[in-house]
Image (tube, rainbow, N blue to C red):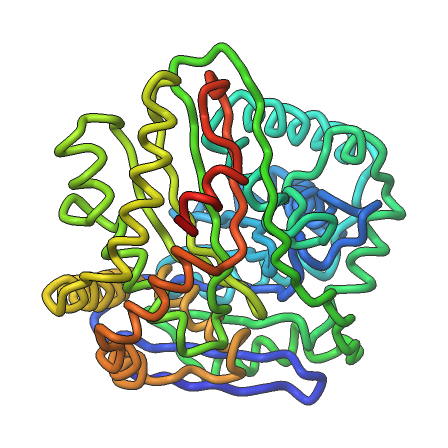
Amino acid sequence: MSLRQDTLPNGFRIVSEDIPGLQSASIGIWVTAGGRNERLEQNGIAHFLEHMAFKGTKKRSALQIAEAVEDVGGYINAYTSREVTAYYARVLKDDVPLALDVLADILLNPVFDPHEIEVERGVILQEIGQALDTPDDVIFDWLQEESYRNQPLGRTILGPAERVSAFSRDDLTQFVAEHYGPEQMILSASGAVDHDALVKMAGDLFGGMKSRPALAMEPARFTGGEARQEKALEQAHFALSFESPGYRDDAIYTAQIYAGIMGGGMSSRLFQEVREKRGLCYTIFAQAGAHADTGCTTIYAGTSGEQLAELAHITVDEMKRAAEDLSDAEVERARAQMKAGLLMGLESPTNRAERLARLVQIWGRVPSLEDTVRLIDAVQNEDVRALAEKLALQAPVAMALYGPVSGAPDLTALKERRAG
């Protein structure tokens, strides 16, 4: 495999990995602008813009965009996160130039037709409505909002319906002007790709863009807090979030190992204690998420309203116990799970392309797999115990509850149990 990286004079970055033996390639443009880059009055516009990218350009209609890729058996899609918006395709190797031309077209030449804006507005409002009808979507939006209250990082990616209903064509073009410069774009490809050909095509398609330095993001502040709503649902949904390392901090690997030990699989502490031994829930898990300058270790479970208080108390108790008796075997198992997940994920060219773009976004380069594995292996039991103690006893915490939750302890009670 051949990993190469280049930058055009205007700051547009290209990274690719040729994988011998493959007949297809994944290729995309990752724009380092997402929900976190929005001002309050823009909340939801990064996602709206992602939708509009497929609704017509100066040379292709919405149908022609879809047909251009699907006529050759390919696939095209996009997503918006809090720090990135991605536009990507999977095609056979001979169709890489076509895929890149389509991606460049939707990014550089959107028409934002007023009729299509209204059509897509309706689609997004339906998407918001669907999310509001999905409790485990709602609770994570609330948890993010309580973790980073009154900050761009705490707002929903979809945005509130009232703002989405008011966005205009001018709002879309303004966001593009502010955030879609060449320095904010990363062309990433993996599979059957020719790097030199990609650089030439990128120069032809994107080289004429004027340099446009990125606007500064508001630094994150983990605030903590509680959101709860009583509703007649079958299950009570319970989620906790604790301030953790960001993705530029090597301690992120410690946080991920800790999350794996606590709730990363069937052998994890919370799964064994809460589900297997006590039968209090069907789903319980922990995960460590990260942003540029902050992170969250999150625990989620769904249970009955009558059992929610017990589940919440056991969760806190298990966190405290982990700070005292984590074993070397647990750390080794979590390390193995992390490395296996990383290496298995790299069997997909789509995952590889996304990883390349993400690493270039974070570091400006792609660290070797050996370096990443070395950082994972460097995490020791005492590192995980130190983080476990911090999360169990000291770290700021947010909580979200949704459903039949009247009997649940409030955040103050859980903090007192942490301290007790």
Q: Would residue 216 be seen by someone viewing this image from the given angle?
A: yes
Q: Nearer the viewer, residue 399 or 72?
A: 399
Please tell me which residue is depicted at 65% across the width and 61% down the height of the picture. Answer: 221
Please tell me which residue is depicted at 70% across the width and 38% down the height of the picture. Answer: 159
Please determine whether, in this image, residue 231 is positioned above or below residue 182.
above
Total numbered labels: 0
Instruction: Left or right? Give the position of 369 relative to 197.
Output: left
Please tell me which residue is depicted at 30% across the width and 85% down the height of the picture. Answer: 371
Instruction: Left or right? Give the position of 103 relative to 52.
Output: left
In percent of width and height, residue 335 lies at 20, 68
Q: Quadrant of the N terminus?
A: bottom left
Identity of the residue furthest to the top in this view: 232
Please determine whether, in this image, residue 90 is positioned above or below residue 15.
above
Q: Nearer the viewer, residue 313 or 283?
A: 313
Q: Would residue 74 be seen by someone viewing this image from the given angle?
A: no
In percent of width and height, residue 241 lies at 48, 49
The picture quadrant where one finds residue 92 is bottom left
Identity of the residue furthest to the front in this view: 420
Please tell me which residue is depicted at 13% across the width and 33% down the height of the picture. Answer: 277
Identity of the residue furthest to the left in this view: 329
Instruction: Left or right? Give the position of 141 relative to 393.
Output: right
The picture quadrant where one finds residue 30 is bottom right
In percent of width and height, residue 285 lies at 31, 43
In percent of width and height, residue 33 lies at 66, 61
